[in-house]
Image: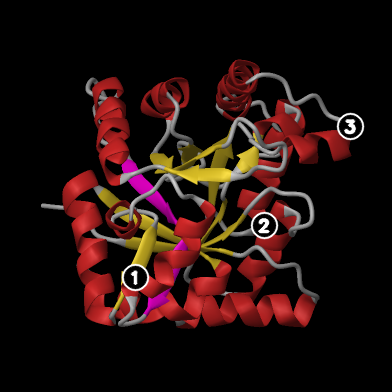
Amino acid sequence: MPRPFRFGVNLMTPAPTGEWRAKCRRAEELGYDVLLVPDHLGMPAPFPALVAAAEATERPRLGTFVLNAGFWNPALLAREVATTDALTGGRLELGLGAGYVQAEHDSAGLPFGTPGERVDQLRRTVEELERLLGSPDHQPRPVQEPRVPLLIGGNGDRVLRLAAEHADIAAFGGAYPDPRSTTGRLLPITAEQFDERVARYRKFAASRAKPAELNLLVQMVAVTEDREGTVQPLLDRVPELTLTQALELPILLIGTLEQLVDQVLARRERYGFSYLTVLEPYMEAFAPVIERLRGK
């Protein structure tokens, strides 16, 4: 049997208390299972935002999507994770990644390093968090046992291997950083490239006793009868893609409501994605899909 769907929304826009709480309550009303906060300069600080989200809601889980390991000292991060899990009543899911926006590191006065160095830092962070939070002597203590669920996001071989070894949730972003960009410009991964990436992850994870949940970050949701016209701006930005390739990108959900539902079901059938995250601007547009697929 396929794993039941879960749906998350990545809340990216800062807001004062009343607006933030209202936004979180609205996401809960729409049926989202997880309220998530990214880790980028100019966006909400993840942990206080999640504590506020917990105070405004009752049902959804709360997660980081994803923390940039290069921004965090592991010992200080362990304190944040444990405290936030306690203050949210054990609803936290910790998402970690290697980071990809050099300009943010430059603004923060932090080293960016090579891709390999950033993955090394991610591995050190994961292993140190497991050591610290796995110790009964660590204070403060998280609420969840045996640990706060861990999501690791990325597409490269070393990150996929790390996710296979350590993560409860393996998250695929569906894009990779443009090596020519310092501002985090992303280039989409085609459907065929996704086949290869997921197959590589499954190879790394073959010895797991319990399969991980697989997550997909959806970059666009558009309810429309004009699929070709809707995707044209992407083709203008990424001329390497054909129209057919663009319409088949797993990170795009474009079409009528019935087509969107079919596309989500197809993502689970083809790749195993049962946990989908949408970006805040598409929170309302995606809600009817959640209603159609609830419990399936």
Residue under pointer 3: 109
Residue 194: image location, x then y, percent: 31, 40
Residue under pointer 2: 87
Indicate the secondary structure of the residue bearing disc 1. Answer: helix
Determine the residue positioned at 72% across, 20% down: 113
Instruction: Find the distance from the CA under tag 3 to the CA under tag 1.
Output: 43 Å
Query: Disc 1 or 2, which lies upstream in sequence?
Result: 2
Q: Is residue 34 or residue 113 the one in the foreground?
A: 113
Residue 40: image location, x then y, percent: 71, 49
Q: Marks 3 and 1: which is nearer the front?
A: 1
Q: Is residue 89 left or right of residue 46?
A: left
User: Which amino acid type corresponds to the residue marked 2 in the rendered image?
Assistant: Leu
Residue 149: image location, x then y, percent: 47, 42
Is the Cβ of the residue at disc 3 closer than 8 Å to that at disc 2?
A: no
Determine the residue positioned at 30% across, 51% down: 245
Determine the residue positioned at 52% across, 76% down: 27
Residue under pointer 1: 228
Indicate the secondary structure of the residue bearing disc 3. Answer: loop
- Characterize the local packing of mark 3: few (<14), some (14-19) or many (20 or more) Cα atoms within 10 angstroms: few
The residue lying furthest to the left in this view is 1
Is the Cβ of the residue at disc 3 closer than 8 Å to that at disc 1?
A: no
**Hey, which quadrant is residue 116 in on the image?**
top right
Say above or below: 137 vs 43: above
Q: Is residue 15 visible?
A: yes
Query: Disc 3 or 1, which lies upstream in sequence?
Result: 3
User: Which amino acid type corresponds to the residue marked 1 in the rendered image?
Assistant: Glu
Q: Is residue 219 magenta?
A: yes
User: Which amino acid type corresponds to the residue marked 3 in the rendered image?
Assistant: Gly
Say above or below: 284 vs 36: below
Q: Is residue 293 magenta?
A: no
Q: Is residue 77 left or right of residue 211?
A: right
Say above or below: 129 vs 283: above
